[in-house]
Amino acid sequence: MTIGDIIVFRGEGFLFKVLSGILCLFDSEWRWRDFKGWHVGFISRFWDNHPIICEAVVGGVKENFLETDRDFKVYQWFDEPVDPHGFVNEHLGEKYDILVYPLTAIAYLIRHYLHRPVPRLFDNAWSCWELVYYFCNRMGKPLAESYDFPMISNMVKVLDDKEGL
């Protein structure tokens, strides 16, 4: 594990099952994936050789120790070392984006039925995957087109493709 690596946690619990089930209606590949991610963060630094991740959670953007007892995957997205210090300091404490769930549903519907991209909107509130998309973009290696609305399922596919999974 290195600074900048993206951590994808396996989905757990009732809410994951409901939202993942809905996602399967529009993205049939999601159903068959061995490892369905539902929370993401990135390694922002190490403390005493233990990784600390930056993540957007219900309490806002925070740094937390990586809980190694949870089921997760580590993806090395960057080919060169990155320094997330400025990015992390800029965003710590910003609010969690609770509206991302209905907005993501609308984006899926527009993509599925109208085959149109949905513009990405940045503000000072973040879902976990919006934060990671923006982090990668700011570090010089975007995960998606800057115009397109971020989707966690697309993120996992791009990361898996880089890893050859």
Image (tube, rainbow, N blue to C red):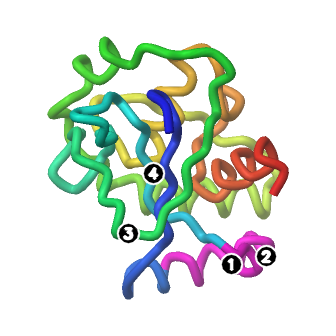
Tag 2 near tag 1, CB within 8 Å? yes
Between marks 2 and 3 in the image, the one whose residue lies nearer the viewer: 3
Pointer 2: what residue? 28
> Could you tell me which residue is drawn at 71 percent across and 72 percent down?
30
The image quarter containing residue 123 is top left
> Could you tell me which residue is drawn at 38 percent across and 69 percent down?
70
Pointer 4: what residue? 40
The amino acid on which the numbered mark 4 sits, given as a three-letter code, is Val
**Relative to 20, is 162 on the left or the right?**
right
**Nearer to me, 91 or 125:** 91
Pointer 3: what residue? 70
Disc 4 or 3, which lies upstream in sequence? Answer: 4
The amino acid on which the numbered mark 2 sits, given as a three-letter code, is Ser
In the rendered view, tell whether residue 114 sits above or below residue 130: below
Q: Residues within 10 Å of mark 4 (few under 14, many from 20)?
A: many
Cα distance, mark 3 to mark 1? 23 Å
Between marks 3 and 1 in the image, the one whose residue lies nearer the viewer: 3
Between marks 4 and 3 in the image, the one whose residue lies nearer the viewer: 3
